[in-house]
Image (spheres, rainbow, N blue to C red):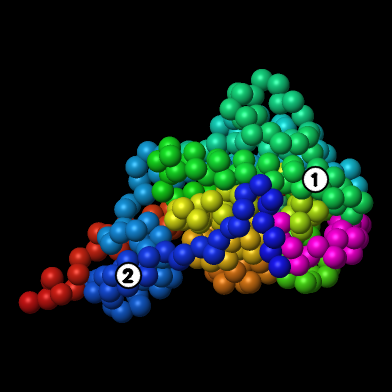
Amino acid sequence: MTASPALLGPLGPVAPPEPVVAGLAADRLAGLATPAGALGRLGDLAVWASAALGSVPPPLLDGPGEVRLVVLAGDHGVSAHGVSAYPAAITPAMVHLVVAGRSGVSTLAAAHGVSVRVLDVGVDDDLDGAPAAVRDHKVTRGSGAIHLVDALSHDDATAAFEAGRVVAREEVAAGGRLLMTGDLGIGNTTPAAALVAARLGLPADLVVGRGTGVDDEGLARKTAVVQAALDRTLDVHDDAFATLAALGASDLAAAVGFLVEAASTGVPVLLDGLMSVACALTAEALAPGAAAWFAAGHRSTEPAQSLALEKLGLEPLLDLGLRLGEGSGAVAAVPVVRSAVALLAGTALLGDVLP
Ligand SMILES: O=C(O)c1ccc[n+]([C@@H]2O[C@H](COP(=O)([O-])O)[C@@H](O)[C@H]2O)c1
Ligand SMILES: Cc1cc2nc[nH]c2cc1C
């Protein structure tokens, strides 16, 4: 069973990118002045992007504001239980750094012409001095420590999910043709790993990774927290939305809403690391078919991210040992997507050059 958030009515199923366009894109790929198959996965990516963007040849995604990242920020009750290598105070500090355009992902986004918007959905701080727009969608201050209590009430989970849907609509209205979600939040790899384990029916030790870099003792604590959270919530694991409320957080629920909305309205999304992919797995459970609108930007070092990608049938474009979060792996993959669409749009057809 995959119950929907009560206020929103039934979700999905989601129709895939237009098969006729995909067929035309595959025909064009086969006709390019390149040896058959020579473009490898760039060719597959070009066909997917063409279909998801709705035209052959595909748009080049080089116009202002066409490629957009939303970084969803929140705090996590488990961060007070020894599961991270860093203190929770990092979360608001990093939100301010993204606002200032000085975070890791800000730098990448500036290099690749990607617009960045950071939103406080659940930061346990007032974020004084941040623009009001950053706090417009705040739902909670932090979330429950998932091994002890539910992360969110059903109403807060619904509000966060709905906020994510609204934000996705805003990004499309602003001209977004390729969207990305990023995350910020000390402790968030713990609930994200728990969400993946619950969906895949796996024990904690198969999904838990070192996040920001916990030592062996931290890893053992984190594994125990995730296993206790899974045991505590076993009776709701067949209900994707109840699992999101029990094991997630408001920033994660917003990311799920964002992904469901993008897929439902036919806008492609480039996924990032563990949080993005864990939320994509939940989005697919809530709105079956949504994953056809997602491509995987990169492989994170977190085992749960690889497990979730495999379940979604997605092969990451990059594998760089990256574990920054913030949407950095997705933004780093944007030039690969642009390469794919440029090749399909600009390369001559062999039939036009043969005598
Ligand atoms: O994207 C990933 O897969 C990823 C892997 C490890 C760490 N992170 C980032 O690091 C923070 C969470 O790590 P932790 O150890 O506090 O759970 C959070 O701000 C994430 O953006 C992100
Ligand atoms: C410095 C720092 C930057 C981050 N960006 C995303 N997660 C992060 C965690 C830390 C600790």
Look at the image and give the residue range highlighted in magenta.
215-241
Q: Residues within 10 Å of mark 2 (few under 14, many from 20)?
A: few
Secondary element at tag 1: loop
Seen in the image, is 330 located left or right of residue 151? left
Displayed quadrant of residue 192 = bottom right
Q: Is most of the magenta stretch helix, strand or loop?
A: helix
Name the residue at the top extreme: 129
Question: Compared with residue 80, is residue 314 higher up or lower down, i.e. above or below?
Answer: below
The residue labelled by disc 1 is: 153
Taking the spot 36% from the left edge, 49% from the top edge, the residue there is 61
Asked if the magenta segment contains residue 223, the reply would be yes
Q: Quadrant of the N terminus?
A: bottom right
CA gap between label 1 and label 2 equals: 43 Å
Residue type at numbered disc 1: Ser
Local packing at callout 1 (Cα closer than 10 Å; few below 14, some 14-19, many 20+) is some
Of the residues shown, which amino acid type is indicated by label 2? Val
x and y percent of residue 59 in the render? Answer: 32, 53
Q: Position of residue 203 (x, y in %)?
A: 83, 70
Residue 83 visible from this viewpoint: no
Q: Nearer the viewer, residue 136 or 158?
A: 158
Tell me: residue 172, above or below residue 329: above
Q: In the displayed image of the protein, which residue is found farthest to the bottom?
A: 36
At horizontal 40% and vertical 60% (from top left) the residue drawn is 52
Q: Quadrant of the C terminus?
A: bottom left
Examine the structure image and report whether residue 64 is included in the region drawn in magenta.
no
Q: Which residue is mark 2?
A: 20
Left or right of 21, for residue 266 = right
